[in-house]
Image (tube, rainbow, N blue to C red):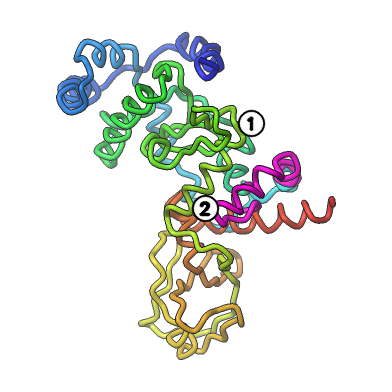
């Protein structure tokens, strides 16, 4: 009930906006979806039809997904998040939630600054939860964005199941242009799979419960393979000429596949924290002077939250800055 009340005002404002013209693909997709979700998941056809009838196609959502921040070069992308204001806010978030972050670290093994950095990048610690109705985002992308329509139709199903399971109003929920919700910006399938009731009140609340938000982010990382106590990434210098057969990744994440011996054979001096048998990625980040980093297993885990090396590197950099600020403030 408290979630519903929190969304009512936002929904009322959104409902007054004029809808964009619905393309034929949207109308046809909605009709097909009604029958599919009703048969497979036990929804009443009339119930789904009435819900989709109140959803609205939004061209702004298509426009937004076609210009993702991750398309920017690293040296521009990092300036979006590595700001002094966000660093200070992150240190404040750590102070205000010290006990919760420490408990999450004990239970999941994820450092507080990593959890804080993800929440800071996703919603600026809850100050920007998104402006699009989730039902509008997922129907628009599921029915009128062929490039990833299958994915977003699956998320629309997950959204309906989530709202049924958690007793949420599907017309009132607001999030990102991609349908992500709450302080950690979980897409519906992630909410259902990884959100936890960390405060023990019987509800997984990723909007109002800092405990649930912190626990859920930590749980997400652990469930994707986070290794407690291990490093994330380290910057290195490389020779002017790298072997042509040496795998170098850029924006798109890849599971670590290089051995320390392969890197040493390429003339790269490895820092002491690199274990002999550890698999690594050699990552090039585009900047006026390109940066080279070794990404460890935990770096790859962060890319499971957002499938971008730029995102994971921003989380890593911000986490270090937040921790430094936090310690400096005492």
On residue 127, the disc is: 1
The answer to which quarter of the image holds residue 144 is: top left
* Residue displayed at 63% across by 38% down: 124
Q: Main secondary structure of the magenta part?
A: helix
For the residue labelled by badge 1, is the local secondary structure a helix, a strand or a loop?
loop
Residue 85 lies, in percent from the top left, at: 74, 43
Question: Is 110 inside the magenta-drawn segment?
Answer: yes
The crowd level at tag 1 (other Cα within 10 Å; few <14, some 14-19, many 20+) is few
Residue shown at the point (55%, 43%) measured from the top left: 215
Magenta-drawn stretch contains 153: no
What is the span of residues highlighted in magenta in the rendered image? 88-116
Q: CA distance from mark 1 to mark 2?
A: 19 Å
- Other-residue count near label 2 (Cα within 10 Å), few / some / many at <14 / 14–19 / ≥20: many
Q: Which mark is on residue 311?
A: 2
Provide the secondary structure element on which disc 2 rests.
Answer: helix
The image shows residue 312 at horizontal and vertical percentages of: 52, 56
- Residue for point 16% across, 26% down: 36
Residue 11, compared with residue 176, is above or below; it is above
């Amino acid at each position: 009930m408290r979630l519903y009340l929190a969304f009512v005002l936002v929904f009322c404002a959104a409902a007054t906006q004029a809808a964009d013209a619905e393309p034929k693909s949207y109308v046809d997709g909605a009709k097909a979806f009604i029958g599919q979700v009703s048969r497979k998941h036990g929804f009443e056809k009339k119930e789904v039809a009435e819900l989709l009838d109140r959803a609205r196609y939004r061209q702004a959502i298509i426009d937004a997904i076609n210009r993702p921040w991750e398309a920017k070069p690293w040296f521009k992308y990092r300036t979006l998040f590595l700001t002094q204001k966000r660093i200070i806010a992150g240190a404040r978030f750590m102070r205000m939630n010290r006990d919760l972050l420490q408990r999450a670290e004990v239970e999941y093994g994820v450092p507080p600054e990593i959890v804080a950095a993800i929440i800071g990048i996703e919603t600026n610690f809850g100050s920007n939860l998104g402006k699009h109705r989730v039902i509008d985002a997922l129907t628009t992308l599921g029915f009128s964005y062929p490039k990833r329509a299958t994915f977003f139709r699956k998320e629309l199903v997950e959204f309906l199941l989530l709202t049924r399971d958690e007793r949420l109003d599907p017309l009132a929920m607001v999030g990102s242009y991609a349908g992500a919700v709450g302080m950690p910006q979980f897409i519906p399938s992630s909410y259902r799979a990884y959100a936890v009731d960390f405060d023990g009140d019987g509800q997984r609340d990723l909007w109002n419960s800092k405990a649930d938000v912190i626990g859920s982010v930590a749980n997400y990382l652990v469930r994707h393979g986070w290794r407690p106590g291990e490093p994330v990434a380290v910057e290195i210098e490389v020779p002017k000429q790298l072997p042509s057969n040496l795998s170098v990744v850029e924006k798109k994440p890849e599971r670590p596949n290089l051995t320390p011996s392969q890197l040493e054979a390429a003339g790269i001096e490895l820092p002491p924290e690199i274990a002999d048998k550890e698999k690594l990625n050699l990552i090039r980040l585009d900047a006026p002077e390109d940066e080279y980093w070794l990404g460890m297993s935990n770096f790859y885990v962060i890319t499971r939250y957002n499938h971008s090396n730029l995102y994971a590197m921003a989380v890593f950099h911000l986490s270090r800055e937040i921790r430094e600020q936090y310690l400096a403030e005492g």
